[in-house]
Amino acid sequence: MRSVCAFRAPRSVPSSPSNGVPDVNTQDHDLSSAFHPTFTGGRQEKQWILQSLRGFYVDEWFTDVLFRVKGGKEATVYCCRAHPATGLDLIAAKIYRPRMFRAMKNDSLYKIGRLIRSSEGKYPDDRTARALKKRSRYGRALDAGAWCMHEVEMLETMWDAGVQVPRVIENTHNAILMEFVGDEYQAAPILQSVSLERDEAEALWERLVHYVRAMLGAYVVHADLSPYNLLYWDEELHVIDLPQAVDAIRHPQAYELFARDVDRIAAYFVRQGLEIDAQGLAFDLWQEAYG
């Protein structure tokens, strides 16, 4: 059974310019409000934390940033102490770094068939479309924000489909607040770092196949599913990192990406002692979903 959290709405929603381009100096919050998190990292990281999370702090979503959970090629995740009014203990804050996808290999592959939207959910006008095509500074900023918005959409879609993912709480153009998986001492480990007994591996594999089937039912292919993007906590798996997810119908290489996902997760469970025909399973699941 997946977990369900209850939380209250914020005093006000962090705003973004209507054009979707990050500009922390024009947000509605009072940026002079005291925000001195316990964890700040280095000088550059501190500046990014203050700029990206101050609005959430002002709106009383959390009271402190406790530690860095994970740093990746596109974003960094932090553990935050939730504000008592939220009804939560901890919150995860994922901050997308500026121009982060320059470090991501072949990012254009994952954007095929995707409609880029602003932080307000609006589709681009002619000017915005030209900026995106020319890769201007404005276009790059909008493109970076679109990856964050896409992950929000995918997390909400997966949640509605019954997949165990961190539930989205709030977001801006470059940051997402979501359920934290773990406790105040440590974040949930990635599955890659966990060794399972055969009985537990069988139960988790069955559950994971159920999640994969549910994702196909929602026309979503994760496109980077592996033991590195699965968290293990309280005998449950949590699917994470969905900015690169693709449409199972519109993307011309959706099946190839799906088969790769199945192969990667199957390889881990084979190492735990299970016998799995990854290629056959991928074919059967795809046929079951789409004929």
Image (cartoon, rainbow, N blue to C red):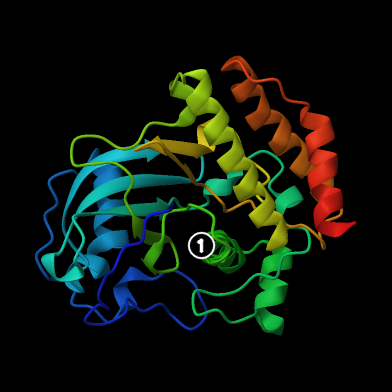
Q: Is residue 78 left or right of residue 214?
A: left
- Residue 144 versus residue 9 in the image, above or below: above
- Spot occupied by residue 95 in the image (x, y as percentages of width and height): 39, 53
Q: Quadrant of residue 8?
A: bottom left
- x 55%, y 79%: residue: 121
- Residue 23 versus residue 62 in the image, above or below: below
Q: Is residue 119 left or right of residue 131?
A: left
- x 30%, y 73%: residue: 25
- Spot occupied by residue 140 in the image (x, y as percentages of width and height): 59, 61
Give whichever of 19, 222 is nearer the camera.
222
Q: Is residue 136 left or right of residue 253?
A: left
- Spot occupied by residue 273 in the image (x, y as percentages of width and height): 60, 15
Residues packed near mark 1 inside 10 Å, few (<14), some (14 to 19) or many (20 plus): some
Give whichever of 188, 126 is nearer the camera.
188
Q: Is residue 103 visible?
A: no
Q: Which residue is mark 1?
A: 159
Which quarter of the rendered picture does the C terminus lie within?
bottom right
Q: Quadrant of residue 215?
A: bottom right
Give whichever of 284, 66 is nearer the camera.
284
Q: Is residue 282 left or right of residue 89?
A: right
Q: Residue furthest right?
A: 291
| Label 1: which secondary element | helix
